[in-house]
Amino acid sequence: MTEGTADRATTTGGPTRRRALILGGALALAPLPAEAAPVTGRHTLRHGSAARAGLLPAPLRQLVTDAEAFLRPSPKRPWYAGAVLLAGRGGTVALHRPIGMAVRYRAYDEKTDTGIEFPPGEQIPMAEDTVFDLASVSKLFTSLLAVQQMERGKLELEAKVAAYLPHFGRAGKQDITIRQLLTHTSGFRAWIPLYSAPTYEEKLQRIWDEAPVSAPGTAYLYSDLNLISLQLVLERITGRPLDTLLREEITAPLGLRRTRYNPPASWRPKIAATEDARKPWSGLDRGLVWGEVHDENAFGLGGVAGHAGVFSDAWDLAVLARTLLNGGVYGRARILEPESVELVFTDFNTAFPGDEHGLGFELHQHWYMGAMATPRSAGHTGFTGTSLVLDPSTDSFLVVLGNSVHPVRSWRSGSAPRVAAANNLARAVPVRPARGRTAWFSGMAVSATATLALPALDTSSGGARLRCALWWDTEPKADVLVLEATTDGGTSWRPVPFTTSRRGEDPRQHPSGSVSGWSGRVWHRLTAELPAARALAVRWRYATDRLYVGRGVYVDGLRVEAADGVLFDEARPADASRVEAAGWAPSAD
């Protein structure tokens, strides 16, 4: 079962060709963007304090508090019966907390829309090592296996799928490439009921006969069929089934002991239950699914599928995250070269803004990454309630594993718990003031407006100039910071154009007097020419929409100079006391 297709619009556009291509097994990469974080070494994970991880403890405590709120009606039913939360930075896991129940309901009563609980003695609470059906997070493992084969020269990114699977080329699919499978630009529709075909061969026949709904490379459309097709390619070129590839190429080298397809019956008490799967909400009548894959197509494929079917726990996913943030190595084990890992964090979907995608990994998706979303933040969600987010810019990672289809899929909607957790982890990463001990911080509230205003100044002599330090990371276009001025006591405000600069880059002009989006997690020097007036008031105004936010805005070191001297200086106590802040809070991050 796919997740995310109802939450995100499909964007159309012309095909694009990245400079990061794998041709004949050789890697040719474009230079990394300036904000890319360097590989931080061969960190291995251990539990430790927030301070050891370089994180603020209060937001981590809030992460747990917010997650526990979704165990209650949110708004009508709990989002999940329970969850395991894991957050870390560098080599330190600073938060690893189970909440709620792994197994609570034995059935769902559709007439009363209630869950029928197991007796209290048979219910199982979440534990740190509870194993989850990852659903579509499984796609990440299939994608990494494909990148491994590219690195070894057995698979080419721009090769046509039909070159490996001749039958695949039917029904207008002859030009679909491996890259298009990995970036969901093949033209496949989201899903077809393969499970209804009685034999494995007939399931394959349905894939061979499936026609694209859009020309390959012209639209983004998330589809399970992409990764199922990639599975067939991998099995053809390696001569090994996907579960064997996963074990031999990823889980065994990294020591992931709780990650596999088709967990044995002995694992069942340690696995989170999923859904009372019955028609019409499920494609199959199976009753309580517990210890077997939830996804109908993966179940129909014997539990081993490229799009779903992997079971894992939070620690194993954290090791995988740490491996990628390390550049493909964990301890003494290397599963990918750094150049190959860059393909995960490189956007191949530049023709489809809003649907940024590395090879297999989604990028810059605020709808579940929240304020952790940056142009290089990578991750994925799963229909059962799972998610993984990696942020190279802060070297941080977040695992949220919930059983949100327990007892039934209709009880949850959206990704609010994932967003809340990501916002809190993002807030836990400190932003040091540009100078001194504190800076003004916008906060991270949705549907909010925050202002920071200077007192009215006499700039009538001309040549007045505002200088300050500015740091911003906002949801692009939706959340905007504007510098404004008024000469009539606030009846009308007009934008003030400004220039920002950072070390190693040319200055940037902002003629609209505003900024939005990602600025690289660094302080920028700002200069603005102010109009001449006898009573000029200047303010920063930051407005957010109702959906998602970024890490926010910081302003520090406000100073206004004119030809005849300094008109305002935040460093002077008398001036600082005259700054008016609405909706802002001083931050000593």
Image: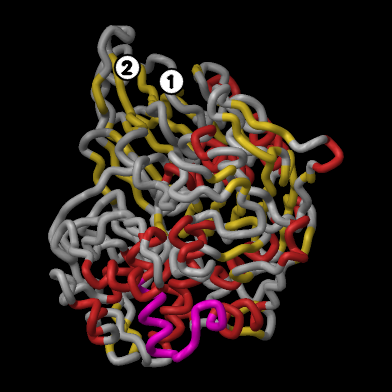
Give, as a three-letter code, the residue at label 1: Ala
Measured from the top left, where is residue 243 in percent x and y? 55, 77
Q: Name the residue under label 1.
A: 453
Left or right of 107: which side holds 503?
A: left
Judging by the rendered image, the residue that carries numbered circle 2 is 536
Is residue 360 shown above or below 119? below
Q: Main secondary structure of the magenta part?
A: helix
Label 1: state its secondary structure.
strand
Question: How far across and down, in percent of the image, does residue 257 sit?
Answer: 71, 72
Q: Residue furthest right?
A: 121
Q: Which of 97 and 310 is in front in this view?
A: 310
Which scheme is used to colour this image of the protein? secondary structure
Nearest to the observer: residue 188 or residue 15: 188
Mark 1 or 2, nearer chain start: 1
User: On the image, which quarter does residue 35 sit in?
Assistant: bottom left
In the rendered view, tell whether residue 525 sits above or below residue 133. Answer: above
Residue 233 left/right relative to 56: left
Tell me which residue sits at (76%, 37%) in the image.
118
Q: What element carries label 2?
A: loop
Q: How crowded is mark 2: few (under 14 residues within 10 Å), some or many (20 or more)?
A: many
Query: Where are the magenta residues, as a range?
Result: 229-245
